Amino acid sequence: MSQGSFAPAVGNSGTLAMHKDSASFVAWIGNCSVVRGFQQIDDTTLGKASQGNSSDSFGKADGVVVSLGDGGVATIALYQQIFNGPGSDFAVFENGFNATFLELAFVEVSSNGIDFFRFPATSQTQDTLQLGSFGAVVASEINNLAGKYQVNYGTPFDLDELPDTVLLNKFAITHLRIIDVVGNISEPFSSKDKHGNSINDPWPTPFASSGFDLDAIGLIHVNGINSMSENEVNSISLFPNPTENVLNVESNSPIQAIQLIDISGKSISFEPSSRINLTYLPSGIYFARITTKKQTYVRKVVKK
């Protein structure tokens, strides 16, 4: 079987697959709105996908899914914002039954619920011969597409891989969106990667479970919460907040660095101490990214 340029399947050296029991996950989504796609996009008489319901994507990955159908969309309004931390920031779980039956999806994020930005996806799978309903996709030929890994293993996403724009604050992600890749490589139905290549995945799948099957989304870097321990959640204190001039930062663990970020996600300064001078800044909302010996936290700061 051919090998691509990207991380390989579960069980191979260099894989990026994240098991559902990884200690990196500090929270799981508990909100999802689904707009189903058709079971087979070129034959709408078959109706739409119907397997599962939106709540089947809640909580830890368990193999119980909501199926999106061809081109279906799942939108998640996060209870707690995700921030751009070191390495991967969240992971998406599908229920592929082996390492090559991979149903794929685009992943997008937003910091305002209106403007969504897509991770730059690449497919090196050939797009001249249509894969069949149970055709094989090689994980190492896929990048930045959810569904790269089989059941119980999440595909990780790193916000650093998104281009910088004033419309996206990578330190305050409020929404996620999962969009089924239509595996049909013929026009006008095909889904394209960042290079304009048709993405070839198992198609058609004219069943109730058609399309991408969303199992769960595990969150890694969550604003204010980077540990399941309540003591860890409360280990950072910012005061006074709101503040007019000076912000004090206290932590149970030694502070290694403090980065001040504006509402657009632009870095303003790296602070050498736990006493931050805000007198030179206009009134508004900012974020303090605090790195301690144990964790990285992002907390909202209000300048009066």
Image: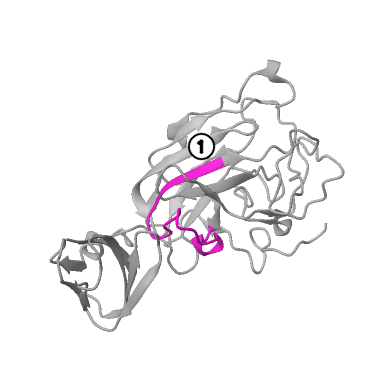
Relative to 246, 45 lies left or right: right
Q: Specify whether residue 159 is painted magenta.
A: yes
In the rendered image of this protein, does residue 67 appear above or below residue 135? above
- Magenta stretch in the rendered image: 157-178
Quadrant showing the C terminus: bottom left
What colour scheme has been applied to the protein in the rendered image? one colour
The quadrant in which residue 96 appears is: top right
Tag 1 residue: 74
**Residue 276: x, y in percent?**
22, 76
Relative to 146, 134 lies left or right: right
Relative to 1, 247 lies left or right: left
**Residue 38: x, y in percent?**
64, 25
The quadrant in which residue 139 appears is: bottom right
Does any portion of residue 128 appear in the rendered image? yes
Residue closest to the eye, 211 or 61: 211
**How many marks on residues?**
1
Q: Give the residue displayed 56% in from the left and 24% down from the top.
A: 50
Q: Which residue lies furthest to the bottom in this view?
A: 272
Residue closest to the eye, 265 or 177: 265
Q: Give the residue displayed 56% in from the left and 48% down from the top.
A: 107
Residue closest to the eye, 136 or 142: 142
Q: Give the residue displayed 44% in from the left and 42% down from the top.
A: 114
Q: Specify whether residue 34 is painted magenta.
A: no
